[in-house]
Structures are given as C-alpha cells and as structure tokens.
Amino acid sequence: MPFHPAPALVVNEADRPVLNAIVRAPTSEQRAVIRARIVLASADGTAIARIAADLGVAIMTVKLWRRRYAESGLAGLADERRSGRPPTYSRAERDRVIALTLEPPPEGVTHWSVRGLANRLEMSETTVWRVWQSANLKPHRTETFKFSTDPDLEAKMRDVVGLYLAPPERAIVLSLDEKTQIQALDRTAPMLPLKPGQVERHTHDYKRNGTTCLFAALEVATGVVTAQTRARHTAADFLAFLREIEHAYPEGEHMSCSTT
C-alpha cells in the first residue's frame, strides 16, 4: 500500500542528541524509545503510516506523539499525570524515606526492608514501597564486581572447563566452593553504597578476619561427607584435607580438583 508523505516535523537541533541517546541507551524504557523514534523519523519526513508499520504501533499513536512534541518539545514525550486519588504522603515524607533508605541499616540488619523502614518512620508499608518504586530504590539487591588482572586467566579457565568436559580416565574430579556467608569476612575494597537507580555494589573477593575453617567434601552419588576442621586456611591445610580425601577413595588412580 502507498504511504502518503506527511509534513516533516520540525525538531530542535539541541533535541536530536537527546533523542538519539534515548534510542541507543540499553536502560531506556521501551515506550520512551518508541516515542523518540517516532519524532526522529517524523523529522526526516517519513510517512506516518510507514512509521507506524516499522514500529508496530497504531497510526494514531504516531500522530499523538508528533503533536505532543510539536506542542511541548521533549517535555511533551513524558507521561501526563494520570487521574485518580493523589498521593497520600507529602514531599517531606518522601524525602525522609529516601534519605533513611540511603543510610546504613541498624546494627544486626543487612539491609532495609519495607516493614523495618515503615516501623522506623511510623508509616504504612504501602507508602514506603511506593516511594521506593518512584525513586527506583532496591535495598534488597546487591551486585558484585571484579576485574581480574591475572594474565593467565584465560588459560586457567580453559583448563578448568576442559577438566569437566574430558576428565582423565579413572579420575575423581572435585568441585570446590567456599561458603563465605558463614565466615567472618570483610571485602577487599570499600562498598559502593545504594543510590536511586543503582543497587548496592561490592567486590566479590574478601579477606578473612579469623574463624574456624571447615573443609567438607560431598560424594553426590551416595551423600557421604568427608569433613575436617582446622584453625587456619593455608595451602598446607588444604593439601592435608585433599590427602584425607585421597585416603577415603583409594580406588582412584588420579584426583583432579577445580575451585569455583
């Protein structure tokens, strides 16, 4: 079907970089991307029906955002205030919730919860949750990060993967993991605190502050656990534990080990 041309939408040159940034940003909401694409395509003189077909939206949707931009510029691409009951909390109460959320939680608590913050501020849990939603705060989430500087990292990764894919004949392959949550630990770098739109972040590696070390090996097939406790966690302690495992499985000719 023919697409009848439409008058080109006049777009401010200062708005073009902003619209292009919205389209390219991986964190942009889909509805914001569609509106920006409509405006950019309209500025190029693309027919309204063609824009609708390319973006999979209705023709009236294209006309709506053309008109909204022509009337109000970039501000016209934002959602209008919806009808309904106004918020039951004031701006000051909202600021109190956000300010306290960004502070460290009470001693003995890992992070703020809706219930804990509501009790602290004597607000309803629904109000706290709505403020968190509006400010994009997620105290329950934590992300870890680490960039390895080991020049042999790629080779080591190949060795570990190859060991799982093709273990030596008559070998016992053990996968080791440390249960760091039950030890007295501290991160190797300062924590990056929570802020609106960004969850709390810390490095995935850590340093120990002294605790009894439990070494345990689980035989998946039978559920048998070979365990040993030691005061330290040195290479010699770990080697002694591996020897104990070796004695527990004398039928194996080789024992291969990988850590995760």
Image (tube, rainbow, N blue to C red):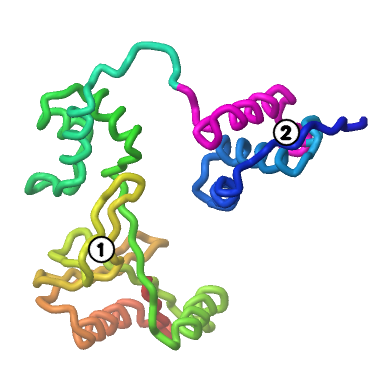
Is residue 96 toward the left or the right of residue 174 in the image?
Answer: left
- Single out the residue that lies furthest toward the left: 107
Give the residue type at disc 1.
Lys
Residue at x 84%, y 33% (from the top left corner): 5
Residue at x 49%, y 27% (from the top left corner): 79
Is residue 257 toward the left or the right of residue 181 in the image?
Answer: right
The answer to which quarter of the image holds residue 54 is: top right
Residue 249 visible, this angle: yes
Residue 161, given in percent of the width and then of the height, sits at 51, 75
Quarter that holds the C terminus: bottom left
Give the residue type at disc 2.
Gly
Magenta residues, start to end: 51-80
Above or below, 1 against 15 in this view is: above
Dot 1: within a 10 Å radius of its alpha carbon, few (fewer than 14), some, or many (20 or more) residues?
A: few
Is residue 91 toward the left or the right of residue 31 in the image?
Answer: left
Magenta region's main secondary structure? helix
- Residue designated by label 1: 179
Dot 2: within a 10 Å radius of its alpha carbon, few (fewer than 14), some, or many (20 or more) residues?
A: few
Q: Secondary structure at mark 2?
A: loop
Residue 82, given in percent of the width and then of the height, sits at 45, 18
Q: Tell whether position 18 is magenta.
A: no
Residue 253 visible, this angle: no
Above or below, 38 against 149 in this view is: above
Separation of residues labelled 1 and 2 (CA atoms): 49 Å
- Residue designated by label 2: 56
Q: Tell whether position 68 is magenta.
A: yes
User: Quick one: 252 or 205, which is closer to the camera?
Assistant: 205
User: Quick one: 30 or 205, which is closer to the camera?
Assistant: 30
